[in-house]
Image: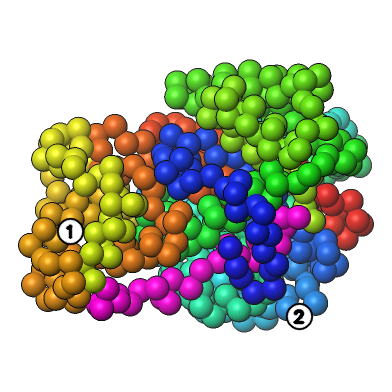
Amino acid sequence: MSCAGLTSIPEAAGFRRSPQEVMRLARMGCTHPTRLSFLRQLLRRFETEAWRFDRPVWDIDAQGVGRALYRAIGPLRTYSLVVFAHDLPPEARSDRVIATAWDATFALFDGTPTPDDLDRLAANVPVQEAGRISPRELSLSRANRSVRLFDHVVARLSNGQQPEPSMLLETGYLMRTTAVYGSGKFGAADRETIATRPELSAPFQAEMLSVWLTRAFTVDLVDHLAQARGGDRAVRLARDLRRGLGVGNSTGLGMAPFLIRHPVLLNNWMLAREEALARVRAQHSVGQKDLRGLQMALHDAATNAALWESGHPIQQAKLADLRHSLDQIETHVARVWDRSVPYPWDALWRWGEATLPIEGQEALLAAMLEPHGNLIDGLGDCMDANEDAYFAIDGSMPVADLRAVLQRDYAWALGVDYTAREHAGRFWYVSQDKLEPRLGDRNEDPGAERELPLDIWRQAAGLWQTLTDFPDHTPVAQVLRAYPEHRPALRRAQITARHPFAEIRDNLIAADMLPIDLLRCKLAFFGATRFDPRSDRWVRISLFQGAPYPDEIEEGMAHA
C-alpha cells in the first residue's frame, strides 16, 4: 500500500486478508467502527492541532426558537455551523425523507458568516430541499428531537436534578439527524473545492464536523430551556452524563449504492483497515501498554454491547453473537493467550478466526487496532480517492488479459443464471419524488425498465460471454467498438485489477440481498454505533456517543 508521506511495512503483506474473504456482504454487515473511522480522524486532528471553538451567536428564546452560531477555529481556516431552531408541532415531526419541517436545521459555513450571510441562510436552510445554499456552505442538514428523552432532560434540569442515567443510555441522543447533505447538493460546495485542504481531505470530514457541532448544540439547547423554565433552581447537564450522548441518525436506501458507485474509494477504505490489521498481526511482541489498551477496548466494547438494543431479528442475533464473543475474547486474553510466541497478535487473530462468528471476529479486529495508534493512524491519509484518475479505459489491453482479470476477480459470478428469480429478484432505481435510490422487486414492482446499472456481476458475466467471440490478442477497444454496452463492466474490471478491494463479492440484485449490510459497512467507517435496523432497508444509529465536546478538546480532556 502506498500514499504520500506513508512508509510501508513489507512484512505486513503476508498477514493481509483476501478480498474474497473480506468483501462479502455477510462480513461487511458486521463491520465495527475503529480508530480509523472518519469521526475519530476528525477529533484527533482537533486535539493535535489545538483547534479552538466558540459560540459567538446565541439568539434562542425561551421556547427554543431562534438562531445560533458555532465556530471551529483551526490553524489555517475557520468553519461555522449555522443553526436555526424551530417550534415544531408534534404532528409535523417525521424522520422520513419526505418531511418538510424539523426541530432544527443547519448549514456548515466556510469561514465566519456575516449578518447578510445569516439572513440569506435563514431564508433557505429551514426549508432544506425547497431552498438553495451557496458554495460558501459545505453541508446542509436537519434534526428532530428524541421527544421523550429531550423533554425528560429539560424537566429534570429545570428542577435542579440530573436526568435518569438509564434513560440517557437507553436512547443515547437528544436529537437525530434525518439527512446531512454535502458535496455540491442543493448548491453546496463541490468536494473538489475542499479536497486539498488537510483538515477536510479525509472522507466526509465536513459532514462529521457538522454533526459534532450539532451535538454540542443539542446539549446547549436543553441547558438553555431548563434555565428558562427553572430559573435559579435549574442546573446544567453533568459532564459525565452528556459524554454518553451522541447524535442519532436515520439512514435509508439513499446511502446504500454509494459503496457500489465509488469502487476506488471503497478499495482505499477497506485496504487501509486491512493493512492496519496486518500491521498489528505482524508485531513481534505485546507491550504492557498495548495489553492494557486492548483490555480497555474490549471492556468498552462489552459495555456498549450491553446497552445496544435492536428490535430487528437479524440484528438481535448478531447482538447475541457479539456479547458472547466479547466474553470469550476477554477470557481468552486474560487466561489463555500466550504472548511469548512469535507474532502473538497473529496468534490471537487466528484463534478468533477459528473460534468466533463473523460478528465477533470483526469486533476483535476493532479492539486489536485500538492500542496501535502510532502504527496505524497514518493510514487515515490513504482513505481518500481521486476516482477520475481511473475512469479512462485502457483500450490496448488484450482480451487474454481481460479474461484473466475476470477469472480471478469475478469468477463466482460468471456462471450464474441471471434469468432465475433468486439471482435477479431486485432492481435499483431512482425515486421520481425524492430523486434518491430505491430498491424494487423485479417480479412485482413497476419500473425495472429504468433500472440503475448496479448489477455489477450480471454485467461482468455478460462481458465474459461476449469475449468468447474474440481471439486472445484482440485489443479490448475492438470489443467495445462492437459491443459498447460493455464499457461499464470493462472499466470496473480494469479498476479492480489495480484495486483488489474495489468490488463487493456478492450479487447486489439477488432476491435475498440485504441493503442493511451495505449501510452498516459505510456507517461503521463514519464511526457510527448502536446500529439498529428498522427493516432490511433503513436503520437508526448514533454518532459521537462517548466522544469529547468542544470545551473538552480545548481543555485537553479528549482521547480520540
Q: Is residue 82 visible?
A: no
217 lies left or right of 428 = right
Say if 38 sits above or below 48 in the image. above
Q: Residues within 10 Å of mark 2 (few under 14, many from 20)?
A: few
Instruction: Check disc 2 and give the amino acid type.
Output: Leu
The circle on residue 153 is none
Q: Could you tell me which residue is drawn at 11 percent across and 58 percent down?
A: 468
Instruction: Check disc 1 and give the amino acid type.
Output: Leu
Q: Could you tell me which residue is drawn at 36 percent across and 45 percent down?
A: 505
Task: Tell me the element at label 2.
Answer: loop
User: What's drawn in magenta, residue-wise?
Assistant: 375-397
Q: Nearer the viewer, residue 340 or 304?
A: 340
Quarter placement of the N terminus: bottom right
Position in image of residue 435 (x %, y %): 31, 58
Rounded to the nearest whole Å, what is the CA distance between mark 1 and mark 2?
49 Å
Say if 144 sits above or below 344 in the image. below
Q: Which residue is mark 2?
A: 76
Circle 1 or circle 2, nearest the eye: 1
Which mark sits nearer the N-terminus, 1 or 2? Answer: 2
Q: Nearer the viewer, residue 419 or 348?
A: 348
29 lies left or right of 341 = left
Q: Could you tell me which residue is drawn at 55 percent across and 66 percent down?
A: 384
Q: Which residue is mark 1?
A: 463
Q: Nearer the viewer, residue 351 or 91?
A: 351
430 lies left or right of 12 = left
